[in-house]
Amino acid sequence: MSIGSVMYRIKEDDTIILYDNESQKKRIISLKFSKGRLNTDKGFIVLSDIVGMKYGDTISTQLGFEYTVLPINLFDFIMKKLNRLTQIVYPKDAAYIAFKLDVKPGDTVIESGIGSGAMSCVFAHYIGKNGRLISYEIRDEFIENAYSNIKKVGFEDRVEIKHRDIAEGFDETDADSIFLDVKEPWLYLRHAYNALKAGGMLGILIPTVNQAEETLRELNLFSFIDLEVSELLLRKYKPTPGRFRPQDRMGAHTAFMIFARKI
Amino acid sequence: MSIGSVMYRIKEDDTIILYDNESQKKRIISLKFSKGRLNTDKGFIVLSDIVGMKYGDTISTQLGFEYTVLPINLFDFIMKKLNRLTQIVYPKDAAYIAFKLDVKPGDTVIESGIGSGAMSCVFAHYIGKNGRLISYEIRDEFIENAYSNIKKVGFEDRVEIKHRDIAEGFDETDADSIFLDVKEPWLYLRHAYNALKAGGMLGILIPTVNQAEETLRELNLFSFIDLEVSELLLRKYKPTPGRFRPQDRMGAHTAFMIFARKI
Amino acid sequence: MSIGSVMYRIKEDDTIILYDNESQKKRIISLKFSKGRLNTDKGFIVLSDIVGMKYGDTISTQLGFEYTVLPINLFDFIMKKLNRLTQIVYPKDAAYIAFKLDVKPGDTVIESGIGSGAMSCVFAHYIGKNGRLISYEIRDEFIENAYSNIKKVGFEDRVEIKHRDIAEGFDETDADSIFLDVKEPWLYLRHAYNALKAGGMLGILIPTVNQAEETLRELNLFSFIDLEVSELLLRKYKPTPGRFRPQDRMGAHTAFMIFARKI
Amino acid sequence: MSIGSVMYRIKEDDTIILYDNESQKKRIISLKFSKGRLNTDKGFIVLSDIVGMKYGDTISTQLGFEYTVLPINLFDFIMKKLNRLTQIVYPKDAAYIAFKLDVKPGDTVIESGIGSGAMSCVFAHYIGKNGRLISYEIRDEFIENAYSNIKKVGFEDRVEIKHRDIAEGFDETDADSIFLDVKEPWLYLRHAYNALKAGGMLGILIPTVNQAEETLRELNLFSFIDLEVSELLLRKYKPTPGRFRPQDRMGAHTAFMIFARKI
């Protein structure tokens, strides 16, 4: 998904947006998984006709209605197309986690578990083609679903999935950062510590206060500094000039985040 | 600053952390800007001795006190070392902006103005060595200071600064994304629209409600979709098991963010 | 509704709670409006049998199932029984407004409009039997509904409703406080100023930023001090020891509140 | 402090506001505690001259500068004049607590401990002359200070202070509501339950998550319903039309509140 290039031609395994200019609605289509015809309420589109197009081009149904073909953002993919078997890491948290862990092109990142692969996609997105994400997961059905999600955005070459219980430890010893999204992260802090490079960052996501406390108690036993415990509240506004106001409802809680740096 | 590599040896223009194991305090040092001896309360360090070391190594003062040498995160650099002439884009916002703009290795990103260079560093961090950040700024003193900050984290090769009034428009026509952090962003939406690729993302940062409204009014005149107006609240907790509670005070407002995608 | 007295006997026009000890569910019943039998899923109750009981007593259906009779709080009434024709002032805001306006037993309070009567009930609750609430409202259907709500909690003697357009001004000149919950409060600030006593408090509720700004602009023309513009966010927690965490969703916005004191 | 009456003449033990029209600054003066002359930067005022005045009147220094005499709100008193030996219950929380506990004229309310008397004043304010607040407190210095605060707003006749350890239980058995602001509220839930009337409300204030959990565990052992655990965030705005925005910093946490109703 090298959508950064202007000369880019759409390939048969890309995930794209079809935008209906009239109704101003989007459809997100994984071409590989949606072979043949796509039926819309304004006729059908032959999907193979999209392959080879450039983003911004239009494609017509057999009845002559036009859709604009647009690239998908990772944000859109996670929020609207990623198949969820689990609670996902939401973009507001995922972006902050990636930044606090200092994830960047070429990094080696470890995560566990893989969940539905949302955070995996974010890490893969930022480490780029030369980076390496090692994802430890014990449950088969999560691996299968997450891998399918990862393939839809073309990141399968950046991600190595290890079907393993992390109670046995991590194979790596010089990871740039480690992210734990497991039920009892406090059990694996020694393993995480050993797998990190000097100065490497540890990130932990937990939904309850009790998990946060248990983790903090255990973290004190290791040489971590720069401890931060935080949560993010995303407040959206109704984009109506003249009657500008916050939306009526908002997410009140996704998770607490804990960050620390290995000395 | 390829701190991802384990074999990495510290160079004479790196910015590093000196960690005092005893007092548990950090000092952030830009080696290039801190030539000679560094005086501490436990004796002095000869800074050139650090060059060639690996992260995790220790260095002693002439009195025998030891400091651990650690790599700096971009987060640390922005919060503690970046020289500020302006209000900066805070990490909570910067991380979300970069993610909403889908910034990734190899991208071409445009920003204006450069401010103190905090957001420039975040963009440069994520686009990597093959990416390109073009930063438009009219004020000399901002350029000078921001460029100095950018050099301290080794990103000068990724950033091209254009000393220009964006009222004249942008030179580029296929940017992956554009970020506006200017006082009157509504004046430049046409230019931003023209500089973006199809499907490219526009991000805007403004502190007041009035600027948000003025911008939204003008945005309606262009073919943008996926409009989002939001703000992020970061709530930190006291990391004390047994007496776990949010901190007493928090930032209540940094800025409103507006996002939209060009069709 | 003098539920403060232990010796209190339930009257035929009270609003009460019937609590099902088995299913742990509450029903709120206005006796006056629910004459005859009340059908439950465990048989029926003869409502007139409740009159004369004390709170805490139990009443049985003809099948022998027991309900405990409890007094209703104003909080419960507003959230669960008050008939709504309009957006109501929520308890979190209502309690803060009453306190900022310094409402207390014996006060004379003016409000406009009456809405569904939620705020009227809160004012009446606090001013007590010797206080006086004058409520200005132009729309018949609102008056009728609000008055019905006010009667259900027995506050009709404390509230005087004036069927009047406040563009004509208020009759009173020494009100302890005035509360405006109207679409264009800035039009009535002179009238509000004239109706207040020296040192009296003005409170204003508006949902949008634009209304807040318009009001603030106009407020500057009058001799008000102690200006406050604020909003309240109520965050609830799941009361589960061992898995303690905030609820997933919350109200993100009800209204902005403006307060000022007449010199 | 029957400041509701227009004909009210200021008495020698009132607490009042002196408002400097020129500098737009307020001074809060307890006449009883500030005998003799009040020195200002514009000359002195003879305080006994204020006794007998009406609110809204002006008083001159011997140099001819004028101050307006205004009534004090309980809000002002708590935030600016109440002498604090402890963390106080802030108005945003105090107002919500009083409302959730359904406090109203004539009620019998129990509280423990008295702290600095802020919450005592709020309860006394709402129960009025015919209400009764019984405040249990074990520490002499808190009683002395709180009682002095309570007298400054003229509520001493409504408050009965019991110098007692609540581990011995409460004397009362039919309180309308009980409020616990103590370090280990879970130790006293049985006593609180026994002291409440049927349908009466219990309110608890605790700063940490751990206290909330301990309390919730114990609450489950008693017949309480309508459990709510919540916190309130007050966000203030800069009241500047044209540059309207939230203030930069805010209180992030005062306390968690727990509410429950006795069956």
Image (cartoon, coloured by chain):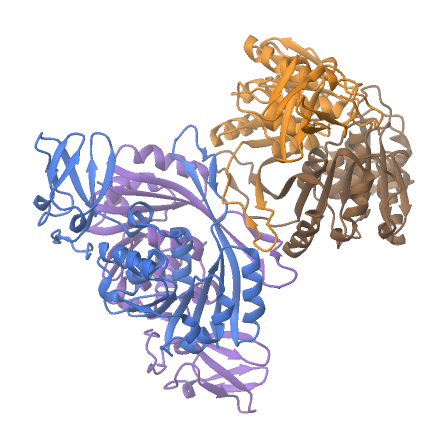
Chain colours: A orange, B brown, C blue, D purple
- Depth check: A168 or A221 in front? A168
Position of the C terminus of chain B by quadrant: top right
Q: Position of residue B107 (x, y in %)?
A: 81, 30
Q: Is residue B128 left or right of residue C16?
A: right
Who's the residue at 10% across and 49% down the image?
A: C51
Depth order, front residue of A200/C253? C253
Q: Position of residue C257 (x, y in %)?
A: 48, 59
In this rendering, is residue B61 above or below C208? above
Q: Quadrant of residue C107?
A: bottom left
Residue D162 visible in the picture: no
Q: Is residue A65 above or below residue B220?
A: above
Q: Which x, y percent locates residue B110? A: 82, 40
- A124 relative position to C70: left or right: right
Q: Nearer the viewer, residue D167 or C252?
A: C252
- List x then y, in percent, for residue D150: 35, 66
In the rendered image, the quadrant that contains the N terminus of chain B is: top right
State the residue at coordinates (51%, 30%). Answer: A213
Q: Is residue D74 above or below residue C37?
A: below
Q: Residue at x 25, y 35 (%)?
A: C25
Count of marks, rendered view: 0
Which one is nearer the viewer's eye here, D18 or B53? D18
Q: Using the rendered image of the protein, determine whether residue C112 is visible from the camera's viewpoint.
A: yes
